[in-house]
Image (cartoon, rainbow, N blue to C red):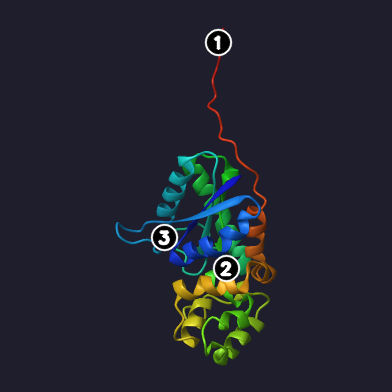
Amino acid sequence: MVELIVVGEGQTEETFVRDVLAPALSASQIYASARLINTSRDQRGGALSLERVRKFIGHTLRQRADTYVTTLFDLYGLDKTFRGVAETKGLTPAARAARIGKLLHEDVVAFADCRPERFIPHVQPHEFESLLFSDITSLCDVEPGWQEQSAPLIAARAAVDDPEWINDSPQTAPSKRLEQLQSRYRKVRHGPVAAARIGLDRIREQCPHFRQWYDRIVKLPALQAQQPNIEYTS
């Protein structure tokens, strides 16, 4: 059995992990659960700085030595305190996300002083909503009347190589396109429902960066807790 903790930004990611990701992974004896980073005493999610993320994940890794920890963070709007955010601009979305993830891995492992393989960073280009563009028809089936407004969404998807390329400006990021066109779109309510309707197979087919992450975590071997080193003297 493998235990995987998925650290997310908000309730959308938490629900996606619980309702979509965890049931799929359980078939491979991977038991996933979500944890959100507290940003204040009475609020969770959002406003994630590198310091807050490093501390939260580091403490999570220290709690037990036989669990894996991964992340589900959006590249869009990622705080500039994360190394790589500024200097990777101009690279492809997946290349940016991979570079930022590599640097985050270095920061967290150094802070937690843990086995490197236990932390698997994932930064989603450009955000969770990019996954929903994997199947516009299924996305628009979530609410009555959405199919009538699907043409701009179809055009946005057709204009890029894959959904993870849909750009990240404040006007045209995936979530902004949905909010502008679907007046009843609510991230927490509709996002996980749409992802479940589309299905992980379709999302993995259309989103290469997400697929690489999923394919990696579904094959994780069980961890054995390390025993303390004991020196014996005669």
Q: Residue at image x 59%, y 74%?
A: 197
Considering depth in this image, is 12 or 37 the residue closer to the camera? 12
Q: Earlier in the sequence, mark 1 or mark 3?
A: 3
Q: Residue furthest top?
A: 234
Q: Is residue 186 positioned above or below 18 on the image?
A: below
Which residue corresponds to mark 3? 48
SS type, badge 1:
loop
Quarter location, residue 134: bottom right
- Three-letter code for the amino acid on which mark 2 is drawn: Pro
Looking at the image, residue 144 sits to the left or right of residue 49; the answer is right
Q: Gap in Å between the C-alphas at discs 3 and 2?
A: 16 Å
Mark 1 crowd level (few <14, some 14–19, many ≥20, 10 Å Cα):
few
Q: Looking at the image, is 145 positioned above or below residue 127?
A: below
Q: Which of the labelled discs sits on residue 125, or is there none? A: 2
Left/right placement of residue 24 relative to residue 58 reads right
- Residue identified by numbered label 1: 233
Residue appearing at x 56%, y 14% in the figure: 232
